[in-house]
Image (tube, coloured by chain):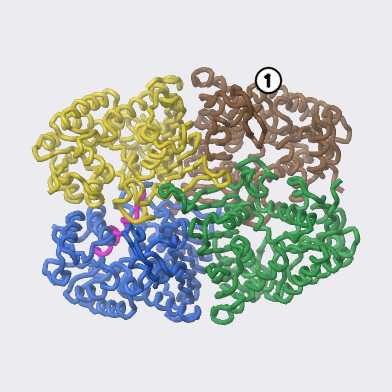
Chain colours: A yellow, B blue, C green, D brown
Amino acid sequence: MTTELRVAMIGHGFMGAAHSVGWRQAPAAFDLPLAPRMAVLAGRDAAKAAESAQRWGWTESSDDWRTVIERDDIDLVDIVTPGDTHAEIAIAALAAGKHVLCEKPLANSVAEAEAMAETAADAATRGVRAMVGFTYRRVPAVTLLRDLIAQGRIGTVRQVRASYRQDWLADPESPMTWRLDKDRAGSGALGDIGAHVVDMVQFVTGQNVTQVSGILETLVTERPLMGTSVGLGGIAGDGRGTVTVDDLALFTGRLDSGVLASFEATRFATGRKNALDLEISGDAGALHWSLEDLNVLNHYDATADSALQGFTRILVTEPEHPYVSGWWPSGHMLGYEHGFSHQVKDLVEAIASGTDPQPTFTDGLRVQRVLDAVERSGANGSAWMGV
Amino acid sequence: MTTELRVAMIGHGFMGAAHSVGWRQAPAAFDLPLAPRMAVLAGRDAAKAAESAQRWGWTESSDDWRTVIERDDIDLVDIVTPGDTHAEIAIAALAAGKHVLCEKPLANSVAEAEAMAETAADAATRGVRAMVGFTYRRVPAVTLLRDLIAQGRIGTVRQVRASYRQDWLADPESPMTWRLDKDRAGSGALGDIGAHVVDMVQFVTGQNVTQVSGILETLVTERPLMGTSVGLGGIAGDGRGTVTVDDLALFTGRLDSGVLASFEATRFATGRKNALDLEISGDAGALHWSLEDLNVLNHYDATADSALQGFTRILVTEPEHPYVSGWWPSGHMLGYEHGFSHQVKDLVEAIASGTDPQPTFTDGLRVQRVLDAVERSGANGSAWMGV
Amino acid sequence: MTTELRVAMIGHGFMGAAHSVGWRQAPAAFDLPLAPRMAVLAGRDAAKAAESAQRWGWTESSDDWRTVIERDDIDLVDIVTPGDTHAEIAIAALAAGKHVLCEKPLANSVAEAEAMAETAADAATRGVRAMVGFTYRRVPAVTLLRDLIAQGRIGTVRQVRASYRQDWLADPESPMTWRLDKDRAGSGALGDIGAHVVDMVQFVTGQNVTQVSGILETLVTERPLMGTSVGLGGIAGDGRGTVTVDDLALFTGRLDSGVLASFEATRFATGRKNALDLEISGDAGALHWSLEDLNVLNHYDATADSALQGFTRILVTEPEHPYVSGWWPSGHMLGYEHGFSHQVKDLVEAIASGTDPQPTFTDGLRVQRVLDAVERSGANGSAWMGV
Amino acid sequence: MTTELRVAMIGHGFMGAAHSVGWRQAPAAFDLPLAPRMAVLAGRDAAKAAESAQRWGWTESSDDWRTVIERDDIDLVDIVTPGDTHAEIAIAALAAGKHVLCEKPLANSVAEAEAMAETAADAATRGVRAMVGFTYRRVPAVTLLRDLIAQGRIGTVRQVRASYRQDWLADPESPMTWRLDKDRAGSGALGDIGAHVVDMVQFVTGQNVTQVSGILETLVTERPLMGTSVGLGGIAGDGRGTVTVDDLALFTGRLDSGVLASFEATRFATGRKNALDLEISGDAGALHWSLEDLNVLNHYDATADSALQGFTRILVTEPEHPYVSGWWPSGHMLGYEHGFSHQVKDLVEAIASGTDPQPTFTDGLRVQRVLDAVERSGANGSAWMGV
């Protein structure tokens, strides 16, 4: 009989739905060494937490996360609350001896992230594991991209481009949301989607960003207050508010090897709904991936017959591709939420094998430090700042 | 408290995995009027059935489908066995007063399909519902495509192209499988993937195929016997066998309105893994969809400003698109298995509202009759045959 | 000093403009063994011929092609008149000892084409050369496609798909033109654009179509008479006329090797302006080319590392690609009319070397015979007809 | 009888070939108010100049440009020599009362460009015209892009992205060329291809870049010396040399309106042969164009029916599109060199109508000043520099 891994999830917004899919689906798709049990869902509002728990398949619900993380019958705490609460919950859960999965960004500040990383490192010495949820690493095409770089398939990396473009603020009359308020959100496009591309560049190259120069820009500084919230945006109400976060972040980073990487994070790229693009150029080839073409990896092999070179559009749905054998036959597409199942798989396997799951809190901290350096550079006329 | 809908699934191959996702995910994504319970999974081998049941979340398992469909605590029977067993199980289940969801193709012969459609029509008079599982109808981009035609957005339909291309037989040394044996599979590319495109053309145009002319071809007639099965194919063993089904079907159909539709179903389109393409041309526009670009619908509006006309690449991930509001924000991709959740949603809603779910067994029969007419045409020098 | 090749062009419609580009540009792009001189342009209307001659760079003009082809100072006659006049002019020119370049289709009937091919074969014995102008063979990506098949890069050809889709008749109120009148045009989509795909399939596979089954369809049988002609279409005038040619041709052909090839030629593919697509599937790979992406060849290598297979998008603008070294650096696009320069290059080189230029009149005749067989099949309920 | 415009071209490298196409083709494609005559081609080596003249259709050749520009029978001087000679020739030609077309970049230094712009402004007062050759402005899709912005089709411009990526230096053993020597080339990727994107951004937005922050990087600082030159690169010889120009330029600019534009110019984007991309985001839509898909403009209309929004792939080959009516029917592709014919058309029309052709030398100077500011910023830790 497989040992159970009893999970409590704290929070139940959009990310709670996505994490729930991961916990529900991973055991059906993969042979896991531990059997996850969706034990408790905790949220501030008891009725709403109960409703979410029932809908998503959690056995119980609670309105008190502090009690939940102390329960003896809980092995792992999955944190999907807003970023300003991550540090408190994660540190408490680790202290209580629970494994922790914490949604990105690790925290809203470097100081909090440092405390979390330190606690996690300490917990690891006692066999308690912590992981931060950058799920895009686990899109099969992205994992394959990383693997091909690691195998030297594109030779020495020479240049990196990373951008994440959305457009939900392109309309200047689109209303205020908490995401546009620095006190609550920490930052704007930079922390929300810029964090993803920073993590992915570090992940796929195996290198850290060591220095940055950049600019943060608020393109529309005043917006109508929110009337009714719909998806990421909503319908305008009365009155107007001030946008206190960045709409657009443009920056250049230098990696360990000295290579330059260009970054863009924007909410004003009209028509680009969720356009995360990576392109890594090496002296023996190149790799390109786009989130809007999730299952495809484009590979250029500069060592091939010169008359036949070009970008090869690899449909990353073959059994030999990362994670794919758990799913469908060749050519059957995976979607956004599969990354959450892959995250569960990797996390459970790491716990069972007594190793640290990736990305660690230290990896999450590293991303926060890069974002912080970008903010400092922006505040100093784009001067280069060490990370 | 929502009334339960207790489900038994008969069969547990690849389609069983996909149907299980639908039953697990639909209640989390949508507000359903009945609460599905994954009660029993039945399969011939007790141990294997038990293993599948545990893995996919079914409460019980059984090795005797006949007993299962008679149980009072079962409301719906979901049939995912091979096509040659559909008729017997479905007719028995309907006779036992259970709603039935039957995976496509409805049956391996027109005669069986006729019996099933007749039984289903009779059952419907007693409030017992039957549905055949052409899930590609429920890809949001396909449903939108159908809706736009129905709204007259492309005017009068003038021409239809439909193809389904795979390549898993392109290698002549790829071994025999049961799918290449006419006795077991009924037909080859025609019945397996041609059935999908016939159903989709009838679905999106709202018209039936009334006449056909075509050819079936076996490109490689002798293959190594199967050693070890992997995915749809496998590794060759000793000896050779004879392929008795078609590898390729090419046919032209005439629709109710007189419009010609061209069809292709092939397992020899090297490099095309799961390339189902539809293009519908009207006198006011056109629509194109490709399964390998699942979330995209291409729409040409011939009434737009002439200097700005072109195919618009609609990312069908907006909340106003069919089924999407149950899932993720704009730009977050859906995959192959979402169609199974949408199928559960529509089936459960139809049962709750006392209406016939679509597609009906009569729709499934209609597809069988088209395939049968293609076989007759092929056997008669491509002469036109009435459906 | 390079010997001159003195050219007379008969006709000056759209094709005259394109051929003139070829004669003007080829000597600047390539080292030719003979120096073409654009000597005389002949047309029925003296003033219009003079105007075209001046505009396009022909030294003289004439309103009498019969006189022109007899002139001692003319070496080659380039025929760009409508198809119903090709036979008379070409046969007379060959009889006068002039080399002939004749625009496709070779003729409007098989009988005419046979006479032309016979005359050309006879002329060849006297060193007089004849070529038919299927310029799409000379798009670098198409020539490369042919070369790769010939080199065995995709192994044994298993299936062929060819389609040519336009949309200038999609609007049912688009007026009559001479192209819709069988007496003048011979046939509709079949002869106009179907001829291209038949030639290309025979060219790239190196095989002939031996049998066909198909259907021709007129989708809109009555249209307004033409008021003012614009491009291929125009503005409706008073009264209505009857369309006597096919709008759509769908047919299947069998090649020498037994392989099936599917063909489509349509003027009703709304939104497809000039969409000629070829896909050749072999047991070791596949090749796909689209005229709307002129400079790109897509190549699938089924022998590559299985995790890295996919269609490679080759930008056919490298110096080692066919014809490209005469033009621009890597990545600089070629357009429609470059094929006419390549045609001149190949024709001039064949004349200089005393060999028969490709495609010969016999190749043109072969295409006519295929089209004729399609018409016969269409008239006989899609029965298979030998070519 | 149309008045002649007698042209002398100075220089005969790759750009000479391209300009010659323009002079040869424009009169055949368009009704020009003056009749260009390709009178003289001048080059330093008499024999080579004579050979180029004959090949490209120039009546005479000369090895002394100074004499040529003084000739009474020359009306216009077309300069296609390397950038370090532009100032001297252009200023002398304008002084001699000749119209001037000068290939980009206008000069290798701001000082030279200033002198040229001043001279041109002065000449204009005497009816002598000067134009700088940024031909990419005249790709029909680019002109259309500019027109749509000017018409307000995408509303207020909010963000601009521009990149020009090539890969001919990606191989670190690719040899030295004069383009890698600062003394001769002035700068590297920045001046060569960065100049294009700066001009295009200013052209399509109708705004100037007023401030910049950026970095220049040499990725490979030492390379083998050139053995044999082939295309832009070549085959390595003995010994090694030092690269003294930038391989990569990354910068951000601020436009008149305050909008940020990101720029990239690189010769290390493996697999990208000539990838010039523009994306302009406005609050009512967006436009995207890529040189590798020359004839296509992608347009997003944010005011369209929300369920049908997406990027529309406009094939810019319709008669109503800029410049297209001179060429072929709908769907027939144009290539790289068509821009040179369009340049001749616009230049000749401006001269005939007594107006200043666009872009002026002042426009060329403006580009130089932006490049200069980027160099200053790069040398000062990416600090923002006024243009």
In the image: residue B70, left or right of residue D241? left
- Does residue C370 appear anywhere in the picture? yes
In the image: residue B10, left or right of residue C384? left
Whether residue A50 is situated above or below residue D373 in the rendered picture: below
Q: Which residue type carries mark 1?
A: Ala
In the image: residue D61, left or right of residue A335? right
Whether residue A292 is situated above or below residue B176 in the rendered picture: above
Q: Main secondary structure of the magenta part?
A: helix
Q: Nearer the viewer, residue A368 or C203?
A: C203
Q: Quadrant of the C terminus of chain B?
A: bottom left
Counting from the top left corner in percent of width and height, residue C146 is at 60, 57
Task: Name the residue rendered at 42%, 54% in the picture.
Answer: B293
User: Mark 1 falls on what kind of element?
Assistant: helix
Query: For mark 1, what is the residue?
Result: D111
- Does residue D31 appear anywhere in the picture? no
The range drawn in magenta is: B333-349
In the image: residue D139, left or right of residue B98? right
- Quick one: which residue is furthest to the right in this view? C72
Q: Based on the displayed image, in which of its 4 quarters is residue A350 positioned?
A: top left
Q: Based on the displayed image, in which of its 4 quarters is residue D20 positioned?
A: top right
Task: Name the residue rendered at 57%, 36% in the picture.
Answer: D166
Give the letter of the chain under mark 1. D
Task: Name the residue rendered at 82%, 52% in the picture.
Answer: C36
Q: Nearer the viewer, residue C295 or D142?
A: C295
Q: Quadrant of the N terminus of chain B?
A: bottom left
Counting from the top left corner in percent of width and height, residue A228 is at 30, 44
- Quick one: which residue is furthest to the front in this view? B238
Residue B341 magenta-highlighted = yes
Q: Nearer the viewer, residue A220 or A382?
A: A382
Q: Nearer the viewer, residue B254 or C278?
A: C278
Q: Based on the displayed image, in which of its 4 quarters is residue A199 positioned?
A: top left
